[in-house]
Image: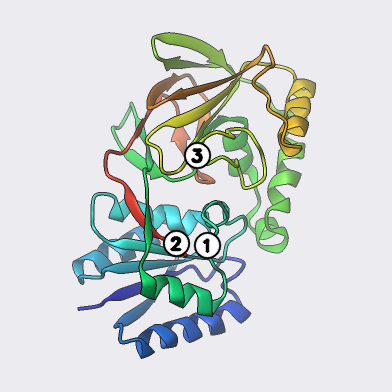
Amino acid sequence: MTDVVLIANPCARGVAGRRRGEIASLTSALARCGLRIETCWTTGPGDATHLASRALGDGAGIIIAAGGDGTTNEILQSIVGTKVKLAIWPAGTANVLARALALPTSVERAVAAIIQGRTRSIYPGIATSDATGLKRYFLLMAGIGLDASIVARVRPRLKSRLGQLAFWISGVEHLLSWHLTPFRIEIDGRTIEATFAAIGRAPRYGGELAITPNARLDQPEFEICIVSSRSRWRYLQLLWRAIFDRLIEDAHDCLLLRASQLRARGEAAVQVDGELIGRLPMSFTISASPVEIIVP
């Protein structure tokens, strides 16, 4: 039986080079504390999900995600509804969840938090495809429209070299040629036409933007930002406001709503936690089972 399984993404920006040595230091420190620990390396997309499922079968009580938000999201797919604790050692491009929870990056503080074992209960969102019934859990946000298109266009090599800046470069390039395709949001008996929607679980969208500023990870409810504008210039204005922490809900073409479920219909792409998952139509709900994430 294994006490702790560390799942590391070798393609994550922070895992290459120096961080590999730190992973060895972290596992050695946990072993000295009497924990039986195994390190597993992902080899491609979706691998972290399978490794987490195997760790559960081996009786692991703690799974450590060493990578970015995408690695954490893959592990999430296997652990919702279980009693395993999730520790996150941020090593990705944006590390949005780690920043939202103020998680440690140093070996010493990470080991201390894992040994202490204090957790916060975080309620994942669920995106369900109406066409296939497939479910995808997410911890941070779902995005419909523009940002999902940007995620699809980001070049992996550019992301590896420039990190989060790659998304900004891709975003500006894409916005100049983007064809705004309206879709419909059905929420609390209303139908709202939109060209972009952010379904937030965390207050900072992408780690920087105040798009869903009142969302809370430990509350079983979404904050939803719905934009109906078809103007590229208007999108740049709204982005500017979000960058400088100014609320955008006072705009006639932007709504902020709170709900625990909604449906979206149309042809737009969808991303969750920075990973493209498909296209509408989809439904979005909150999981009844929280995930226990280790915090300092």
Q: Report x, y in % for residue 185.
A: 47, 17
Q: Amino acid at mark 3?
A: Met
**Left or right, residue 252 beside residue 270:** right
Give me the disc on residue 141: 3
Q: Report x, y in % for residue 45.
A: 44, 57
Q: Which residue is mark 2?
A: 295
Are circles 1 and 3 on residues that touch, CB within 8 Å? no
Q: Report x, y in % for residue 119.
A: 37, 59
Per the image, label 3 sits on a secondary structure element best described as strand
Q: Earlier in the sequence, mark 1 or mark 3?
A: 1
Tell me the crowding category of disc 1: few under 14, some 14 to 19, or many 20 or more residues within 10 angstroms, Cα based.
Answer: many
Tell me the crowding category of disc 3: few under 14, some 14 to 19, or many 20 or more residues within 10 angstroms, Cα based.
Answer: many
Per the image, label 1 sits on a secondary structure element best described as loop
Q: Earlier in the sequence, mark 2 or mark 3?
A: 3
Q: CA distance from mark 1 to mark 2?
A: 6 Å
Q: Can you see residue 289?
A: yes
Q: Is residue 50 above or below residue 219?
A: below
Q: Report x, y in % for residue 277.
A: 45, 40
Q: Nearer the viewer, residue 92 or 241?
A: 241
Q: CA distance from mark 1 to mark 3?
A: 19 Å
Q: Amino acid at mark 1?
A: Leu
**Left or right, residue 162 beside residue 292:** right
Q: Residue furthest top?
A: 190
Give me the disc on residue 103: 1
Q: Quadrant of residue 242?
A: top right
Give the residue at x 32% y 74%.
Answer: 4
